[in-house]
């Protein structure tokens, strides 16, 4: 799990936000979409203020006052005595601001103001930087629902996703859950499962790459929490914004589809570390060092379906493999740090390979210690998952951690909601997982409990909905 993970991209900068109305925020739908947006309280943001939110504390999160009585976050952080801000004694590293009074509001900081555009060549949520909160949900079409009903559903879902990603209210029946928040880097991504095509009479349009995944020896799959006709991935940097989108998607499904399974995940919040860094998983390991990067020349070829594809409706799309991977944390945490590092093949503290260097140093697979033993064990996870050890197979991993409580035996039900993207899963996920099946040291400490494979079409152009080329082609 540790070698290929989070895309190292920054969230797009937020557009200018309207100032706060004099007489309070209008209810969603009362006026134009802009006036009904969740970001109604935001002042106009400069490009720096609309940055990714990963800057060190106190930097790139300020906003100049837009009117009398509005104070910037940077100014708040610098006026502890006047505003009720208390600094922690441990090096002055932590600060706590008193809630603003009724006549003294604070503009959205960059975390809330960041907006991801819905329309584009590719759907968002693939190369978008990891968000702090995520929901994965699969639906099955209702009995009697077919191609017509599916098209209407995707049209509704796309309209709702476009509005919510812009920080606007749903077109109808908005719950007001995210009323006070900005877009918060919300993304909503849609995909089709293998069974969708038979349900809609579109079997001839089903891609070969969507053939069911083979069985793996590490699988302990719950069929009720696997696969599905339709799949939706939701991510945002605010929990209420993410939940609001989940609820809206479920409501818009109406009588056309019902929830098959749903899973909740999380990641570290932007700005929670003093510098941008690769994420850690629940085992404490830095997870994502060797993830393919959009700046690489062959990135699109590895991750996205080419324009001249068969079927043509998948052009610009990608295939998502979704796995619920339970981490056996009690067993893992009994290991010494040295034993954990041998399982992974990297230093727990820095992510550097055991062969030496920094996190990004190329791993020396042949290096031995004074006794002639390989420094990076032959069954280390980082060794086995390398593309050059798997015929060049690569995938863009974009996971969420999960914790669903403590089971009856007192063991954490926690782990990784593994989501990986590739142009063809038979050349991406499958060969790597087969290699892991044959001797990965990490397999003793994880269990694959649910699985799904989904065809995620390209993004929708202006005036279109996601999947339109399939459903109306």
Image (cartoon, grey):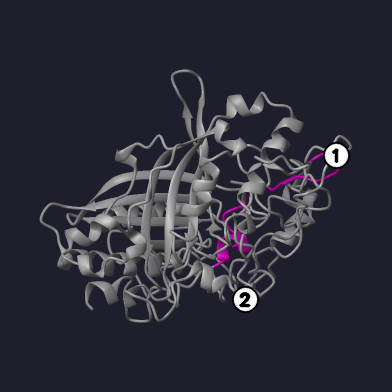
**Where is residue 361 drawn, in percent x and y?**
79, 57
Q: What mark, if any, has residue 308 been given in the picture?
A: none
Tell me the residue that label 1 is attached to. Answer: 369
The local secondary structure at tag 2 comes to loop
Circle 1 residues within 10 Å: few <14, some 14–19, many ≥20: few
**Residue furthest front in the image:** 372
The local secondary structure at tag 1 comes to loop
**Where is residue 302 drawn, in percent x and y?**
53, 68
Query: Is 104 colored magenta in this rendering?
Result: yes
**Where is residue 181 drawn, in percent x and y?**
50, 59
At x 78%, y 50%, the residue is: 80
Query: Mainly helix, strand or loop, the magenta region?
Result: loop
Depicted 169 relative to depicted 351: above or below: below
Depicted 262 relative to depicted 302: above or below: above
The magenta span reads 88-114
At x 62%, y 29%, the residue is: 332
Tell me the residue that label 2 is attached to. Answer: 297
| Residue 44 seen anywhere in this rendered image of the structure | yes
| Residue 176 seen anywhere in this rendered image of the structure | no
């Amino acid at each position: 799990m540790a070698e290929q993970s989070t895309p190292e991209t920054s969230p797009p900068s937020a557009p200018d936000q309207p100032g706060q109305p004099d007489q309070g925020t209008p209810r969603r739908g009362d006026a134009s979409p802009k006036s009904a947006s969740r970001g109604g309280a935001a002042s106009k943001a400069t490009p720096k203020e609309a940055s990714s939110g990963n800057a060190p504390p106190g930097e790139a999160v300020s906003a100049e006052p837009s009117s009398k009585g509005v104070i910037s976050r940077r100014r708040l952080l610098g006026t502890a005595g006047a505003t009720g801000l208390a600094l922690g004694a441990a090096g002055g590293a932590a600060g706590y601001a008193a809630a603003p009074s009724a006549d003294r509001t604070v503009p959205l900081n960059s975390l809330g103001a960041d907006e991801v555009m819905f329309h584009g060549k590719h759907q968002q949520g693939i190369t978008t930087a990891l968000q702090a909160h995520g929901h994965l949900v699969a639906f099955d079409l209702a009995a009697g629902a077919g191609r017509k009903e599916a098209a209407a559903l995707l049209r509704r879902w796309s309209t709702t996703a476009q509005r919510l990603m812009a920080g606007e209210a749903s077109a109808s029946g908005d719950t007001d859950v995210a009323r006070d928040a900005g877009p918060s880097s919300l993304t909503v991504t849609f995909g089709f499962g293998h069974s969708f095509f038979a349900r809609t009479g579109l079997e001839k349009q089903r891609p070969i790459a969507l053939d069911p995944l083979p069985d793996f020896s590490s699988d302990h799959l719950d069929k009720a929490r696997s696969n599905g006709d339709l799949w939706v991935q939701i991510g945002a940097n605010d929990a209420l914004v993410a939940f609001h989108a989940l609820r809206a998607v479920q409501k818009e499904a109406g009588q056309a589809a019902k929830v098959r399974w749903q899973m909740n995940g999380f990641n570290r919040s932007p700005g929670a570390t003093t510098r941008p860094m690769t994420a850690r998983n629940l085992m404490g390991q830095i997870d994502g060092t060797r993830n393919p990067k959009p700046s690489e020349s062959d990135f699109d070829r590895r991750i996205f379906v080419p324009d001249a594809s068969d079927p043509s409706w998948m052009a610009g799309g990608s295939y998502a493999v979704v796995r619920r991977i339970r981490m056996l944390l009690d067993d893992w945490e009994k290991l010494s740090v040295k034993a954990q590092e041998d399982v992974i093949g990297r230093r727990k503290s820095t992510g550097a390979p055991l062969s030496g260097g920094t996190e990004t140093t190329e791993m020396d697979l042949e290096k031995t210690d004074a006794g002639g033993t390989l420094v990076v064990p032959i069954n280390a996870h980082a060794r086995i998952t390398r593309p050059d050890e798997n015929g060049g197979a690569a995938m863009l991993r974009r996971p969420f951690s999960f914790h669903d409580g403590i089971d009856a035996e007192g063991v954490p039900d926690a782990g990784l909601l593994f989501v990986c993207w590739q142009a063809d899963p038979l050349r991406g996920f499958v060969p790597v997982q087969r290699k892991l099946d044959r001797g990965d040291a990490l397999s003793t400490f994880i269990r694959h409990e649910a699985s799904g494979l989904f065809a995620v079409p390209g993004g929708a152009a202006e005036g279109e909905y996601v999947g339109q080329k399939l459903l109306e082609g």
